[in-house]
Every structure is written in C-alpha cells, then in structure tokens.
Amino acid sequence: MSDTQPFDYEDRVILESFDLVSGTFDFMYRSGQLSSVKFGDDPKAPHRKLRRTMLADAKAGEVGEFLTADFENDMVEYCDGAADIAVVAIGALFEAVGGNYQIARAILSEVARSNLSKFDDNGQPIKDKGGKVLKGPNYSPPRIREILEYYGVEIPEVAPDASSFVSMPEENGVRPGAVDGEGHAAVPPALRGPAHGERVDTPMDRNFTPRKIKDNPQA
C-alpha cells in the first residue's frame, strides 16, 4: 500500500504556482546550502564531490536511477528521476554562481534562448537520423562566460587534466548508472538506444539579453 496521498484538483492548483528553479533556491536557502557556497579552484572540494555523487554515482546517483528506470520501463521512477536530475543540476548552478538567484536565472534563460536559435528560418527543427535536433544556420551558442563576467563572477582556471578529478565506480563491469570520465553514460551496447529530441513550447524571447537589476531580494 502506498504511503503517498491522493492527488486532486486542489493539489493541482497549488502546484501550478510552484516553479522548479525558485523551489530549488528556497530549499537550498532553508537548508543553509547558500550561505557560503563557491565554485572555487578545487574540483576535489567536498561540496563538488557531493554534487558529482548526487548526479552520477553508479549506486546512489540520480542519473543511474533514471537510466535504470528507463531500461526497466518504470514510468513513475523515470519521471521522478528526470525531475531529481533537474533539481540537482539547478542546485549545482546555484553553487557555481555563489547562490545568486538572478545570475542563475539569466544563465538558464540564455541556454533556452540558445536552444531555440537552432531552428531554421521557418521555425522548424533540423534533425539527424536519430531524431536529435541539430544546430541550424541561425544557431548562436549560450553566452555563459559573458553573463558571468557581466555580473562580476570570478571564473577559475580550467583544470588541464579533468579526468584525474572524476572517478565513477564501476563495481561489476559497466553498470547502467555508471558514467565515464567524460560524463557520458557507460551503458552496455545492447541497452543503448538512439538519441532523440522533441520540441517544447516556451515563451522564451529569442533576443533575451541579461540586464542588471539593482535591487534583487533573492540575490
């Protein structure tokens, strides 16, 4: 018997007012995770290790749970895993920008703008044989560095050998949840399927340009 409560119209109305980014920020703020976070120069720092484990650890990582649910055709756990990955990833973004809500929002909006620029002049996607949406003639990459510099975020030097910092356990050979040194899912060939893309309607403005806001209560 499930210990969860039934979902009804009142729940739907309440949840429609929620926002994943704001909710993740609120969770991190209440749990004290935003008080002293900084990306820093050391990929081996405890908070960086914890974030990698939460995402990609072969046993406890959200990506592993998501892939397992996918291979087992478990729709409930698949949806839960997808949402959990989004929360952990957004949390990582907040950590990278020192807990600044405004900067994180600007980056997410810029990535969405960049994705929408992949479509052709008729607003149609260009796909490969596997269904992945390719970069069209109007594509422009996300201006992540430009946004960070605009807001005065310190950007550390890139590590010359990132593979030495990332260690993903693979206990009994390759597991569905294991990730290789480049962050790709290490999945047995028999379980690999074609990548696919799907257009999602969004009101995002293609010409979004981040603007500095002097007073931001959530910054």
Image (tube, helix red, strand yellow):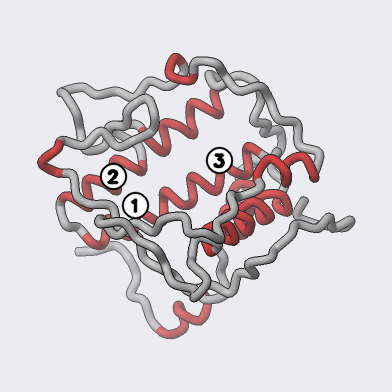
Q: Indicate which disc, 1 or 3, sits on the residue closer to the N terminus.
A: 1
Q: Label 2 neighbourhood size at 10 Å, few (<14), some (14-19), many (20+)?
A: many
Amino acid on which the number 1 mark rests in the picture: Gly
Name the residue at 50% across, 45% down. Answer: 89
Viewed as shown, does residue 72 lie left or right of 124? left
* Chain-order first, disc 2 or disc 3: 2
Q: Nearer the viewer, residue 62 or 205?
A: 205
Q: Residue furthest right?
A: 214
Q: Is residue 210 left or right of residue 3?
A: right
Is residue 94 in view from this perspective?
A: yes
- Disc 1 vs disc 2: Cβ atoms closer than 8 Å? yes
Amino acid type for the residue under numbered disc 3: Ala
Label 1 to label 2, Cα distance in Å? 6 Å
Q: Quadrant of the N terminus?
A: bottom left
Q: Which residue is mark 3?
A: 92
The image's mark for residue 65 is: 2
Q: Secondary structure at mark 2?
A: helix
Visible in this render: residue 20?
no
Q: Quadrant of residue 217?
A: bottom right
What is the x, y in percent for residue 145? 68, 40
What is the total number of numbered labels drawn onto the structure image?
3
| Residue 81 marker | 1
Name the residue at 74% across, 59% down.
209
Whether residue 106 is situated above or below residue 14 in the rendered picture: above
Quadrant of residue 94 within the rendered picture: top right
- Secondary structure under badge 1? helix
Near mark 3 (Cα within 10 A), the count class, few <14, some 14-19 or many ≥20, is many
Q: As shown in the figure, which amino acid type bears the numbered disc 2?
A: Glu
